[in-house]
Image (cartoon, rainbow, N blue to C red):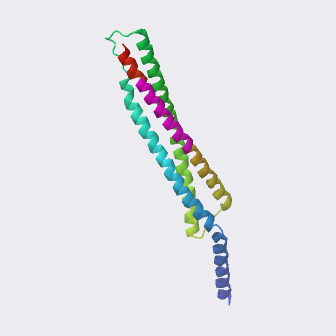
Amino acid sequence: MKNLLIILAAGALTVMACKSVEQYRAPIEALTAEWSKTGEMVMNTTSQLENANTFLGGMVDSFKIDSTKKWSSNALAGMNEAKTAFMAQVQGLSGLVTEVNDFKSKWQTMTADVDALSTGLKNVKLEGDVMAKINDLKANSATAISQCESWNKNIMGAQATAVKAWDMFKQALTAK
């Protein structure tokens, strides 16, 4: 009789545990899907930034002024202005690289939290304030989306400004 009571109690606890975990299934699955899409956006933004930084960094050496030629003061001023504008964009992207890499580290930590929720759901073992964790991660996903949009605009703007500076430099080179 004791064994039967123990088995029934264990069964009841298992059913209750499954039922309490089941209430989080839809929110965790939605979070996981959203997180995956946002993670792809974060990685794409990171790649875009790295490519832009590499491209512009490779152009830095192109901004050399031949000191053996006689340049007019207007041409020199134009070349220096263009080089300064270009370098400002390169420095801006370098700062953005640091910011994005810091965010990417935080993102990886939060991804482990999302994975832990998914694993907990599969293993029927969720601990702590699950809904608060889900809501926090959803808010971080929304923040990541807006950050990526902002970073992408900054990257595109820096590239466009750098190309204009390069064009100004080439024009000044021909002005002599």
From where the camera sits, is residue 99 visible?
A: no
Depth order, front residue of 26/18: 26
Residue drawn where x is 45% and y is 21% of the image:
82
Queried whether the magenta region covers residue 75, the answer comes back as: no
Residue 60 placement (x, y as % from top left): 39, 27
Residue 25 placement (x, y as % from top left): 61, 68
Give the tally of numbered discs: 0
Residue 121 falls in image quadrant: bottom right
Residue 16 falls in image quadrant: bottom right
Q: Is residue 114 above or below residue 146?
A: below
Queried whether the magenta region covers residue 157, the answer comes back as: yes
Residue drawn where x is 65% and y is 78% of the image:
15
Residue drawn where x is 59% and y is 45% of the image:
146
Q: The C terminus lies in which quarter of the figure? A: top left
Residue 95 placement (x, y as % from top left): 51, 33
Residue 84 placement (x, y as % from top left): 47, 21
Is 15 on the left-hand or right-hand side of 175?
A: right
Q: Is residue 143 above or below residue 166?
A: below
Q: The N terminus lies in which quarter of the figure? A: bottom right
From where the camera sits, is residue 153 visible?
A: yes
For this orientation, the residue located farthest to the left is: 68
Q: Is residue 85 above or below residue 16?
A: above
Q: Is residue 115 above or below residue 17?
A: above
- Magenta-tinted stretch: 148-167
For this orientation, the residue located farthest to the bottom is: 1
Magenta-colored segment: predominant secondary structure:
helix
Residue drawn where x is 45% and y is 42% of the image:
48
